Structures are given as C-alpha cells and as structure tokens.
Image (cartoon, grey):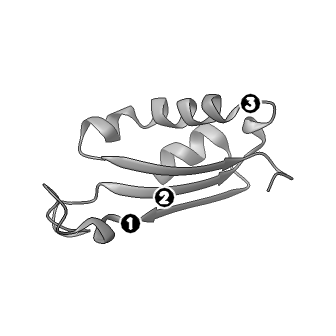
C-alpha cells in the first residue's frame, strides 16, 4: 500500500497505520496483523497532487488506486489527505 501511494502521489508526508487490532472481536473480524485480519487502515498524505482538488476527488483518487487492496480484504480506510500548507 505504501509503495503504491508513494509512486502515485509523490507525497511530502505519508503515514499508513494498521488499526485492525482495534476491530478485533467485531463481527467477522478475527484480529489484527498476523491473524489474516489486516483490514482497517488510517492513511495520512500531504502531496502537491492534492492542490486544487476537492475532498471527494482526493478520496476517489486514493480509493481507485487501492481497488486491488479492497478486493483482497481491506475493509476500511480513514483518509486525511492534504495539499502542502493545508491544516
């Protein structure tokens, strides 16, 4: 996931956090890493590519890029996508 995001967006800042462990025990979720349950991630990106793009356009770009991950078990992404200088 990090490699795809880096290649596509050339970010100034990138953080991918696996939050799957926080969902262990929820319906249909066996647990976090090492249990076949890496399904929930928080992604933070600061990239020039997001300049002039709406929140929806930014989210769509990331979701489209990671379509393969969604098809293979990723269930949720919490996204914080900013252009340089945005808070």
First along the sequence among labels 2 and 1: 1
Among all residues in the image, which is located at the extreme front? 27
Q: How many marks?
A: 3
Q: Say which quarter of the image contains residue 49.
A: top right
Residue 50 placement (x, y as % from top left): 73, 37
Instruction: Please name whichever residue, 10 or 49, is drawn nearer the observer in this view of the structure.
Output: 49
**In the figure, is residue 7 to the left or right of 66?**
right
Image: 40 above or below 4: below
Q: Disc 3 to disc 2, how far (Cα)?
A: 20 Å
Instruction: Give residue 56's position: percent from left, percent from top.
Output: 61, 31
How far apart in space, not on screen, are marks 2 and 1 (Cα)? 7 Å
- Residue at 78% x, 45% y is 83
**In screen coordinates, is 33 left or right of 58?**
left
Name which residue lies at 43% across and 49% down: 77
Q: Quadrant of the C terminus?
A: bottom right
Pointer 1 residue: 19
Q: Secondary structure at mark 3?
A: loop
Query: Pointer 2 and pointer 1: residues touching (CB < 8 Å)?
Result: yes
Q: Secondary structure at mark 2?
A: strand
**Residue nearest the observer in this picture, 46 or 29:** 29
Q: Residue at x 25, y 68 (%)?
A: 32
Mark 3 lies on residue? 53
Which residue is tagged 2?
42
Query: Dot 1: what SS?
Result: loop
Q: Residues within 10 Å of mark 2 (few under 14, many from 20)?
A: some
Q: Earlier in the sequence, mark 3 or mark 2?
A: 2
């Amino acid at each position: 996931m990090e490699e795809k995001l880096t290649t596509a967006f050339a970010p100034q800042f990138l953080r991918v956090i696996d939050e799957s462990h926080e969902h262990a025990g929820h319906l249909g979720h066996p647990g976090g890493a090492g249990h076949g349950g890496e399904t929930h991630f928080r992604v933070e990106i600061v990239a020039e590519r997001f300049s002039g793009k709406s929140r929806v356009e930014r989210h769509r770009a990331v979701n489209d890029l990671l379509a393969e991950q969604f098809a293979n078990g990723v269930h949720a992404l919490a996204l914080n996508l900013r252009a340089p200088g945005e808070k």
